[in-house]
Image (cartoon, rainbow, N blue to C red):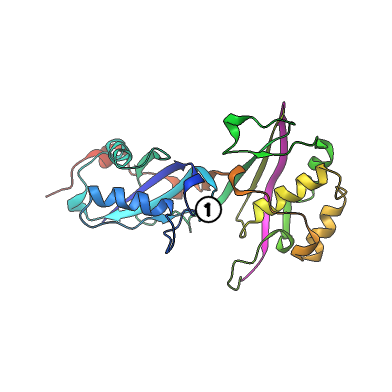
Amino acid sequence: MVKLKLTLAYDGTRYEGWQVQKIGTGVQQKVEEALARLFPSHPRLHSSSRTDTGVHALGMVAHFEVPKAEWTLTPRKLALAINAWLPEDIRVLGAARARPDFHARFAATGKQYRYSIWNHPAMNPLLRHVAWHVPRRLDIRAMRAAAAACVGRHDFRSFTANPGYARQSTIRHLTRCEVRRRGPLLTVIIEGDGFLYKMCRGLVGTLVQVGLGKFPASEMRAMLQKRDRRVAGMTAPAHGLVLWKVFYSKRAAAQVTPEAASAPPAG
């Protein structure tokens, strides 16, 4: 078997999240349908994440395997061939031969999400599908102080929705939680070793309510300690969130050499 790694971007507006759905359409379904056009074995994708309905991605990573006899393309041509069968709101940004032991989900060491907020009385119509409109002026200093309290290893139960199944742990380690401002556009950057169901949106919704004065910034630590979703703020809308990047160790990210990747299968 030959293992291929894909880096994908998509506008999640029209999709019920990444995963194949019983009702509605997931991004995964569209990419697998494109792969079925290219490979008789109809390969199944394994992703690094499962983004929710309406959430976007710029750096989703997924892998699949095909029999050596079916692998006749170069990685560059593979990306072009898949894109030819995809709708315009989904694109493969890159393709590469991966190590046999690579796994898009289990080899990931961390992820970065970014959330966009348009903080102006009038919404920017060009950003209406990718940013949350908050018309009231936000206190950025308070938001930054609250965001800093989230960095480190904490139980984030107060910021996650019930996924409908038992979880082994709600403890996660955030290495970054910061609020950037460029004019009326705010970007919340959240980076960590993993994320719970709707955790990023719970954090962002709470930060915005801190910025609006509903909670003091000092309350963020108490919310973490109480481990109760009812004590924290709202869940931010899905359309402002983007899976920005997935991190891997150097070994896991190592690719098969270009020469081997472009060579036709032996025999």
Residue 222, image x and y in percent?
A: 85, 59
**Residue 99: in sight, yes or no?**
no
Q: Which residues are magenta?
A: 168-183
Q: Is residue 64 left or right of residue 19?
A: left
On the question of residue 198 being in view, the answer is: yes
Between 58 and 172, the one lying in front of the other is: 58
> Is residue 167 part of the magenta span, yes or no?
no
Work out which residue is located at the far bottom of the displayed protein and give it: 166
Q: Is residue 222 above or below residue 166?
A: above
Residue shown at the point (23%, 41%) measured from the top left:
73
| Badge 1 amino acid | Thr
Residue 157: where, in percent of width, then height? 71, 64
* 184 lies left or right of 88: right
The question of residue 179 being in magenta is answered with yes
Residue nearest the observer in this picture, 232 or 102:
232
Q: Is residue 62 left or right of residue 85?
A: right
Mark 1, residues whose alpha carbon is within 10 Å: few (<14), some, or many (≥20)? many
Q: Residue at x 38, y 57 (%)?
A: 101
User: Which residue in the protein does label 1 denote?
Assistant: 51
Residue with the most extreme top position? 183
Q: Looking at the image, which residue is at 64% across and 48% down? A: 237
Task: Provide the secondary structure element on which disc 1 rests.
Answer: loop
x, y percentage for residue 250? 48, 45
Main secondary structure type of the part rendered in magenta: strand
Snapshot quadrant of residue 92: top left
- Residue 154 point in image, percent of width and height: 73, 59
Quarter of the image where the N terminus is located:
bottom left
